[in-house]
Image (cartoon, rainbow, N blue to C red):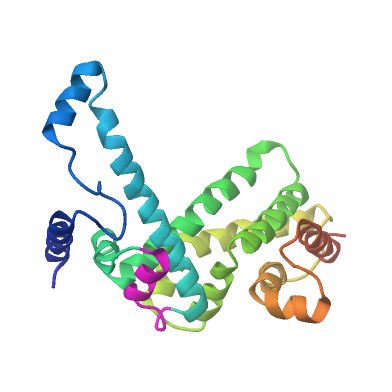
Amino acid sequence: MNIDHHAKIARQAEDSSGYSGDDVRPLSAEPALNRKARKAKDPDRPVAAKKRAPQKRAIEARKRILKAALDCFGAYGFEGTSTRMVAQRAGVTHTLVLYYFNSKDDLWLAMMDDALGTYSAALAENLDNRSGKSAAERLRIFIEQFVRLSADMPQIHRIMTMEGNQDTDRLEWVINRYLRDHFGRIKDLIKKGQEERSVRDCDASRLYYFILGAGGTPFTLSTEYRAITGRDVFSEPEILRNVAFLYELVFI
């Protein structure tokens, strides 16, 4: 069944029932008499205003789907997740998931783009060598930024831990789209910090992966971390302690 047919089924179901499980369309059409009366009272009301509410609900529904996908892929991996599972978690119809994302593969790619796109843009801005900051200062910014990303979205670290052990098109895509450039930029920053004698003298590639592991793993294992240490890794004091600990290990 193709995606156009899915969309047709969704529209037919909504038109016949007056209700859609995703809350993207209005529940019922407004009677023509009421519309005329309202228009007479407010003749200058912009036409675009009528479209804003449905558009807003559509955007919110798409965000819910992407968040549900992040949760599901992070907990169950790609093979263990289905689009129906994502729909149920998001509280939308399965048809709506397929309307926005044609397949599970497309949903995974959109979810990773949504999660990593904003982070990459912010990272690029903060690591700009035209900022006048030293390599050590920019590396400190990266470390805190990465730790906070891991706290906000621990699912990403879990997903990449699972994907990183598989030779798949998904891994190749995320490497080429995000990770290769990310690795190159941080590795160069580490080397420049070593030239400044502010970063420990060691293999830059190993230090890169050490930062990622130490910065992300506590949030990935948050339940175990709390049970053993008695501390909440997501609390602001604990986040700052983890950042400070990484600073002690990375910088001279």
Q: What residue sits 58% from the left and 71% below the top?
A: 157
Determine if the magenta segment contains residue 79.
Answer: yes
Looking at the picture, how far across and down is residue 161, in whole percent?
56, 78
Q: What residue sits 86% from the left and 63% below the top?
A: 248
Q: How many marks?
A: 0
Determine if the magenta segment contains residue 7.
Answer: no
Q: Is residue 51 left or right of residue 85?
A: left
Q: Quadrant of the image for the C terminus?
A: bottom right
Question: Is residue 65 something one can see in this rendering?
Answer: yes
Q: Quadrant of the image for the N terminus?
A: bottom left
Viewer-nearest residue: 61 or 79:
61
Q: Is residue 219 left or right of residue 30?
A: right
Q: Quadrant of residue 125?
A: top right
User: Does residue 121 lie above or below 242 as drawn?
Assistant: above
Q: What residue sits 15% from the left and 36% below the top?
A: 31
Viewer-nearest residue: 212 or 38:
38
Looking at the picture, how far across and down is residue 239, in whole percent?
76, 60
Viewer-nearest residue: 213 or 52:
52
Question: Is residue 206 something one can see in this rendering?
Answer: no
Viewer-nearest residue: 202 or 177:
177
Residue interval drawn in magenta = 78-91
Looking at the picture, how far across and down is residue 238, in whole percent?
79, 62
Looking at the picture, how far across and down is residue 236, in whole percent?
76, 56
Q: Quadrant of residue 44?
A: top left
User: Does residue 94 lie above or below 199 as drawn?
Assistant: below
